[in-house]
Amino acid sequence: MIEQKRSGFFTLTSAGLMPQEEMLEVGRKQEDLYIGIPKETHFQENRVPLIPDAVQLLVSNGHKIVIETNAGKGANFDDKDYSEAGAQIAYDIKEVYKADIVLKVAPPSLEEIEIMQPRQTLFSALQLTIQPENFLKQLMAKKASAIAYDYIKDKAGIYPFVRTMSEIAGSTAVLIAAEYLSNVNEGRGMLLGGISGIPPTEVVIIGAGTVGESAARAALGLGANVKVFDNHIYKLSRLQNDIGRRIYTSIIQPKILAKALMRADVVIGAIRSKSGKTPCLITEQMVSDMQEGSVVIDVCIDQGGCFETSRVTSHADPVFIKHGVTHYCVPNIASRVAQTASQALSNIFAPMLLNVGESGGMKNMIRNNPGLRHGIYLYNGILTNKFLGDTYKIPYKDIELLMAAF
């Protein structure tokens, strides 16, 4: 009996000690990316999508980057900075457009689309309200895959590019208002904020989104008295909770808003509309009733503006005066602080591109990342954006169906 037990013990032990097949995870093959960064040609666009530090990170991970000469000049980055980071400097834009992935801040011009290679991948902003029809048709003819970075979502469902640029725009709007209240720009000679013994500056913010919240934080930090208006109670409540203090908030009611505007020193328009055009909430009469020398910053001018008196201005000639009120209506406020804005863009682009390489290429990344798919409006030359399809009467297909087909 003992012998049988011993025999059984040795049999089981021997079986347990037999060499076993090792189970190893099958790793995905990393793909080395070829990225091109052309110099921005859009009017007063000073930003660059990747700063030298991000280029060094990507190059050290095996990716190739070619950047057009002086592409970072507007953000105070020299060719030398990029060269030392490992990028190749191109003196001919055609060399940049030989890359598999083209990275831009503003949408490419029709001339740039002409020199694009077939089936290239393009990352750029998409300006839905002003995008010309020829722009789409030329990209479709190139069989390009085009991704609007401002429509990409992260895992939390937030638009990271829009959010970070909105934070910059909100904070910058308050600093701009401070400039135009001072004597330097022939303002009223006021300090934006408040000090002991002097009533604080009155700042009215229309919109409680990311721009409005950032503007409120900046104005409160300077000591101003802030009033925020929005049509969504949830947004107003969230803003109060996020700021961590009670401030004046109100639903947009014409009489209450008009009364607040009459006392305001600064008014910041920061409301957005999902339909593509901002509603005009502040009438010309409301503006004419404001104090002489007060300042209006219309951050949403790129969507039409929320002031009836607004008209588009430029960084070269940023303001005009109407009814004694200084109006600042420059689109793309973030380009005013191009280096900070470029760093913010780069902080999102660099990890995304690293993930593309680790995923085995753009096709795998698109297939596995629903947030990235949300930004695609062209896939291999096929239109996938419903708004563009309906606007220009061009057939479009759902990107989810295309992913299943390819």
Image: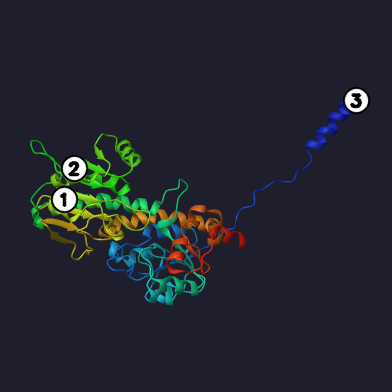
Mark before the other along the chain sequence, 2 or 1: 1
Q: Image point 28% across, 42% down: which residue?
A: 251
Q: Which residue is mark 2?
A: 222
The mark closer to the camera, 3 or 1, is 1
Rendered location of residue 369, percent (x, y) = 52, 53
Q: Image point 47% across, 70% down: which residue?
A: 99
**In the displayed structure image, the side of residue 220 where residue 348 appears, left or right:** right
Tell which of 1 and 260 is nearer to you.
Answer: 260
Tell me which amino acid carries mark 1.
Ala
**In the displayed structure image, the side of residue 99 where residue 128 appears, left or right:** left
Tell which of 86 and 333 is nearer to you.
Answer: 333
User: Marks 3 and 2: CB-CB under 8 Å?
Assistant: no
Rendered location of residue 215, percent (x, y) = 25, 47
Q: CA distance from mark 3 to mark 2?
A: 90 Å
Rendered location of residue 80, percent (x, y) = 33, 66
Q: Residue 206, which numbered label?
A: none
Q: Please identify the quarter of the rendering in which residue 364 is found.
A: bottom right
Q: Which residue is mark 3?
A: 3
The mark closer to the camera, 3 or 2, is 2
Mark before the other along the chain sequence, 3 or 1: 3
| SS under mark 3 | helix
Q: Which residue is mark 1?
A: 178
Q: Image point 41% across, 51% down: which residue?
A: 159
Image: 89 above or below 168:
below
